[in-house]
Amino acid sequence: MTTHAPTTAYVLTAIGDDRPGLVAALAAAVDEHGGNWVDSQLALLAGKFAGIVRVDLPDERAQSFLQALPALADEVGLDVEATVAGDSVDVEVAPHSALHLHLHLLGQDRTGMVREVSSALRSQGATIDALRSWTREAPEGGGMLFEAEAEVRLPADADEDGVREALETIAAELMVDLELDTTE
């Protein structure tokens, strides 16, 4: 029978000027301390590399790992902060307990769009699991377009029609195209 050493889940947030080797340096630090890279979201935005990573670390090596993180800033320019993950890390949402929606928004860029949409979702009890947004030139010199995609989770007792109505109201006010599809 194999026994496993107790581990603690940490969420790491990392940011630095983009350059080769940032992920490799962080992965090496995790590995050198016996950690397991469990989940991550990494992105490049405006010349900055940013990431959020969940790692599991053996309790007996966690302190040395935490003490090693500041060296990454000196070595490769990557500032990393570690926080013990919340209690819900291992809790999976049962497929029947939540409704998952994919949202796509496209319209003329203006301030307040993310605030308006996220407020409408919050009013319906929705959780935004992922959000990606960007701007781009409109065809034929029509200014800037704002585009966003989001993965949204509704509680089991949420009214999908109510969510759609709240978002359609916002879409009309913002004069944007909004698509909302149920996902598996």
Image: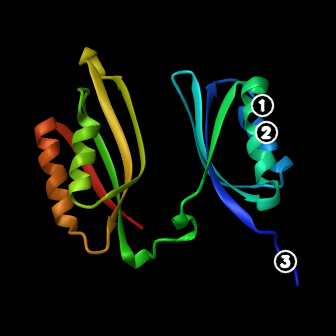
Earlier-in-chain disc, 2 versus 3: 3
Earlier-in-chain disc, 3 versus 1: 3
Regarding mark 2 in the picture, which secondary structure is present there? helix
* Residue at 21% in and 41% down: 116
Residue 127 rendering spot, x and y as whole percentages: 35, 57
Residue 68's disc is: 2
Regarding mark 3 in the picture, which secondary structure is present there? loop
Quarter of the image with the N terminus in it: bottom right
Q: Which residue is mark 1?
A: 71
Q: Which residue is mark 3?
A: 3
Residue 112 rendering spot, x and y as whole percentages: 23, 32
Asked which quadrant contains residue 34, the reply is bottom right
- Does 139 appear above or below 29? above
Regarding mark 1 in the picture, which secondary structure is present there? helix
Quarter of the image with the C terminus in it: bottom left
In this orientation, does residue 47 appear?
yes
